[in-house]
Image: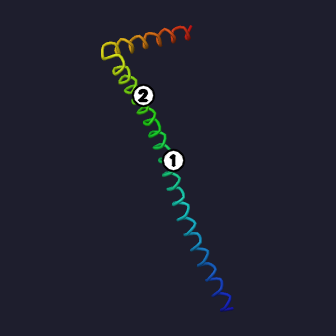
Amino acid sequence: MVNEEILITGIEYKVRKLIEVNSFLKKENERFFQESELSAKKIIELNNKIEENQKEIFKFTLANTLEIEFGVEEGSKRIDSLIDEIDRCIEVLSE
């Protein structure tokens, strides 16, 4: 009878320890999940920033190319002309 009580006590102790470990792992899993969501949002923000920076680099490259090829005034006129043409295309496409 004493052996059975010792076995039962040992099993109860092990079950309590497993419950504690399970609770800890659930909390840790939730924390990792939240960190994962934050990281995913940060990745999206950084990708958007990269796209914006790439657009800016393209603009500067285009402006520098036009400036080198045609000079400042002529390059500026060409850019204005291209912008006007793009605006006309947008108007035609929106009709």
State the image coordinates of residue 79 (x, y, percent, origin top left).
39, 15
- Which residue is tagged 2? 58
Please tell me which residue lies in front, 56 or 18: 56
In-image side of 53 versus 93 (left or right): left
Q: Which mark is residue 37?
A: 1
State the image coordinates of residue 73 (x, y, percent, origin top left).
30, 13
Q: Is residue 88 above or below residue 68?
A: above
Please tell me which residue lies in front, 94 or 23: 94
Q: Quadrant of residue 8?
A: bottom right
Q: Is residue 1 above or below residue 18?
A: below
Q: Is residue 55 above or below residue 84?
A: below
| Residue appearing at x 54%, y 58% in the figure | 29
Q: Residue type at mark 1?
A: Glu
Question: For numbered disc 1, what is the local secondary structure?
Answer: helix
Badge 1, how many Cα within 10 Å: few under 14, some, many 20+?
Answer: few
Who comes first in sequence, dot 2 or dot 1? 1
What is the C-alpha distance between the residues marked 2 and 1?
32 Å
Please tell me which residue lies in front, 79 or 38: 79
- Quadrant, the C terminus: top right
